[in-house]
Amino acid sequence: MKKWIIVLFVLSLFAPLTCPANGEEAQKEGPGTAFGQVVDEDGSPLPGGVVSFFKAENGVAPLIADVHRIPDIVGRMYPDGRFNVKLRPGSYYMGALVITNPGRGPGPPRPGEKFYYARNDKGNLREIAIGTGEEKDFGQIMMALPDTFPEAKNLVTIQGRLLKDDGTPFAGGVVLVKTDMNKQRPDFVSPRTDEAGRYKLRLPADTPYFLLGRERSVGRPVSGSYIGTYGSNKPISLGGALPIGHLRLGQPASGMPAVEGVDIGPGKDLPKTVIGKPGQSFTGVDIMMFKMPVPGEQREKLQGTLGFGVNKQGKDKEQKKTGQEPANHK
């Protein structure tokens, strides 16, 4: 039981809180409760794991075989396939991840694990709708594997590599996919890159996508870690694209740690998008990875470049202490 509590707690980090912040919002957008039982195409209950809910209003169906869309809400699926989850009012796509090892930790489906989606009577993705404060029993919800849906056909394929700025492959990274660069959370996350830094995405067609290279799939970029943005071939400190947002602001953006005494200045690089028609394939979509600035290192580097810094200032202070005039002062 403790293992399940830990798994659900960590998985919830992927999703926003379900409870509104204040009383007025709670009355206006109070969560409803959805419950029921998930079964496979033969009518047998799925054997336990996690149920996931994806807001349909975001427009991008999560139905990709090898790419995981981060859910908006997650909840436990009991061994008999039953679930009971609080949801904010709205319409959702529903998924179910069968987990045989509760201590495996968070993240997308792993090799050997199966992820299902709710299917309607016509064989398409089913939407689960719930109202404010509503308690709704959905009964048995039929689930099916991703490649059985018509929406999974004729996808856009995007392939490329994550590369460090010295041209070497970046292995073990992920590509975050966003339809809006200003969103904090990505729409999809790729599997980890192989030893050659290669990644492959299969995404719904006719949608522009921003591609972001990262060391990890969750959390903000941290100083010292590697990041990359498709369309940007320079590090942030030299005008490269910011990890969040289209334009570079006067102050460090929300994805970049503040560096005391360092003005990152105006940037010229802006992220590029990739958009394709059904069945279209893109290759060579490489993303250059750069190390996020480390405050101390970046400050020293800039001070040395500008011809002044700790050494010179320290020398002047020492000269003042001894009463000696600096040689270049008159």
Image: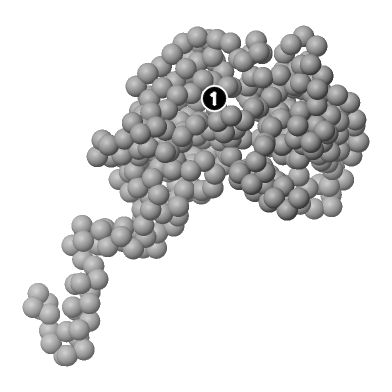
* Residue shown at 80% from the left, 11% from the top: 121
Query: The disc labelled 1 sits on which kind of residue?
Result: Asp
Can residue 309 be seen at all in this image of the molecule? Answer: yes
Q: Is residue 133 above or below residue 207?
A: below
Residue 308 lies, with reference to residue 77, above or below; the image says below
Given residues 121 and 299, the one toward you in this image is 121
Quarter where residue 117 is shown? top right
Q: Position of residue 223 (x, y in %)?
A: 41, 54
- The residue shown at (64%, 27%) is 114
Q: Is residue 312 left or right of residue 134?
A: left
- Height in image: 187 above or below 292? above
- Judged left or right of residue 321, residue 78 is right
The residue depicted at 41 percent of the width and 22 percent of the height is 159
| Coordinates of residue 259 in the picture (x, y in percent) | 40, 59
- Where disc 1 sits, the SS reads loop
Instruction: Say whether residue 178 is visible.
Output: no
Residue at 83% x, 47% y is 26
Color theme of the render: one colour
Spot occupied by residue 321 in the image (x, y as percentages of width and height): 21, 89
**Residue at the left extreme?**
327
83 or 79: nearer the viewer: 79
Q: Residue 27 sits in which quadrant?
A: top right
Q: In the displayed structure, does residue 215 sit left or right of residue 168? A: right
Q: Residues within 10 Å of mark 1 (few under 14, many from 20)?
A: some
Q: Is residue 137 left or right of 194 when viewed as pictured? A: right
Q: Which residue is mark 1?
A: 66
Q: Quadrant of the C terminus?
A: bottom left
Query: x%, y% of residue 165?
Result: 28, 40
Please give the count of numbered marks on the rendered protein.
1
